[in-house]
Amino acid sequence: MQQTDPPTSMRGLARRIGVHYQSIQYLCAPDRNAKGSRHTFELARALGVSPRWLASGKGNPFRHDHRGAILDALETVGVLLDQLQRIAEEMEENGTSAKHAKPGKKT
């Protein structure tokens, strides 16, 4: 993953987004060549940079580039749709209907 300047404390960043310090350490290790993670969006938000740039180094690191923001939004929508699809499949496998599921409760 690309790093921002000035550097942020890895421990502080980990606490801020609710992950283990080792996860941040792994993502920042140059020899790992990490290309993002499931926490990329939270990391980018905490650092004030574009998730696309953070994961790939492509595009503008800062959010004032509207094209990057649109691509980020489309990527986020794709991730959310995948998650919703998995939830729907799990509900179907368990014989649970979305009509009967209560908000905030796992079925």
Image: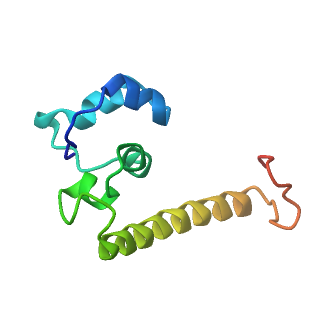
84 up-or-down from 34: above or below: below
Query: Which residue is more in the foreground, 104 or 7?
Result: 7
Q: Residue at x 31, y 70 (%)?
A: 68
> Which residue is pictured at 73% across the width and 59% down the height?
91
Q: Nearer the viewer, residue 104 or 89?
A: 104
Question: Residue most toward the right?
Answer: 100
Which image quadrant for residue 11? top left
Query: Residue 14 at x, y = what percent?
Result: 41, 29
The N terminus appears in which quarter of the rendering?
top left
**In the picture provided, is 94 more to the left or to the right than 76?**
right
- Quarter of the image for residue 52 reads bottom left
> Where does the image place residue 42, in percent across and percent down from the top left?
44, 46
Q: Is residue 100 left or right of residue 2?
A: right
Coloured how? Answer: rainbow
Q: Nearer the viewer, residue 47 or 2?
A: 47
Q: Is residue 31 above or below residue 21?
A: below
